[in-house]
Image (tube, rainbow, N blue to C red):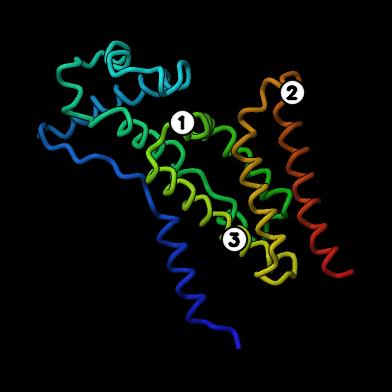
């Protein structure tokens, strides 16, 4: 008999991981909330461009102050340190809520696999580019607890995807091949924005449709293997 209590516990755990954000410092030295918001936006915008240009390790707080226009004597009224800025940027860009995950897109059963993958890759590549570049370039410099949170959230999304693909393909949800494919789809969505140097002369729409069609064909092949 299937242990439904275990399934419920696992679902609750995944739900918690899926909603997990990186911990941002609580700073209460300034009471003016609109000023805090404005200054943090200045700081984060400047830091993002510097992190992507110079790298996280090479960027100093002095650099961020110079580019943002925020005085070095007051910057700590809005952020705790460089790692706090990185957490805020990743929460805004990597964990952004206005870009649907593939498991959410697949809930629409009217979408073919090709259409679902195309929607997913289009949104990820166009709207999460900076967040993706930031995440992968800064992982070596992140605090250990932040890396764990990042990995845990991605794991939850991939398990959700595996669970969504199983009924579409007529496969058992515990089939390990679903986890492999889910991992690969997330990999494609993440590294797509970093492909520019390789196929710069090919139109984006051609790349998008080709990769979506190839991904759908690969996923469907699992069902064919199961039936033979």
> Which residue is depicted at the point 28% across and 14% down?
62
Is disc 3 placed on a helix, strand or loop? Answer: loop
Query: Circle 1 — which element?
Result: helix
Assign the C terminus to one quadrant of the image. Answer: bottom right
Query: What is the x, y in percent for residue 184?
Result: 67, 47
Image x and y of residue 117, in percent: 68, 47
Q: Which residue is mark 2?
A: 199
2 and 3 marks in contact (CB < 8 Å): no
Nearer the observer, 45 or 174:
174
Q: Quadrant of residue 90?
A: top left
Residue placed furthest toward the bottom: 1
Q: Position of residue 84 (x, y in %)?
A: 30, 34
Residue denoted by label 1: 138
Place of residue 13 in the rendered image (x, y in percent of width and height, measured from the top left): 44, 65
Number of marks in picture: 3
Number of the front mark, 1 or 3: 1
Identify the mark nearer the N-term, 1 or 3.
3
When the figure is inspected, residue 137 is found, relative to residue 209, above or below; the finding is above
Question: Which residue is identified by label 3?
Answer: 107
Question: How far apart are the two marked residues, 1 and 3, measured between alpha carbons?
Answer: 32 Å
| Real-space CA distance between mark 2 and mark 1, rounded to the nearest whole angstrom | 25 Å
69 relative position to 225: left or right: left
The quarter in which the N terminus is drawn is: bottom right
């Amino acid at each position: 008999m299937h242990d439904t209590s275990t399934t419920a516990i696992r679902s609750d755990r995944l739900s918690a991981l899926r909603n997990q954000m990186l911990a941002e410092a609580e700073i209460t030295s300034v009471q003016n909330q609109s000023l805090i918001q404005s200054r943090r936006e200045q700081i984060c915008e400047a830091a993002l461009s510097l992190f992507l240009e110079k790298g996280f390790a090479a960027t100093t707080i002095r650099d961020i102050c110079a580019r943002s226009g925020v005085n070095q004597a007051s910057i700590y009224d809005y952020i705790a340190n460089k790692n706090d800025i990185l957490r805020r940027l990743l929460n805004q860009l990597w964990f952004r809520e206005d870009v649907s995950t593939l498991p959410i897109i697949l809930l629409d059963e009217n979408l073919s696999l090709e259409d679902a993958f195309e929607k997913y890759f289009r949104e990820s590549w166009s709207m999460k580019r900076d967040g993706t570049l930031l995440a992968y370039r800064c992982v070596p410099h992140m605090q250990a607890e932040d890396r764990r949170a990042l990995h845990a959230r991605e794991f939850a999304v991939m398990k959700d995807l595996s669970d969504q693909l199983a009924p579409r393909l007529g496969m058992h949800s515990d089939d390990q091949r679903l986890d492999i494919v889910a991992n690969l789809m997330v990999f494609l969505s993440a590294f797509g924005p970093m492909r520019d140097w390789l196929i710069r002369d090919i139109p984006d729409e051609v790349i998008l449709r080709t990769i979506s069609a190839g991904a759908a064909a690969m996923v469907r092949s699992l069902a064919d293997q199961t039936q033979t």
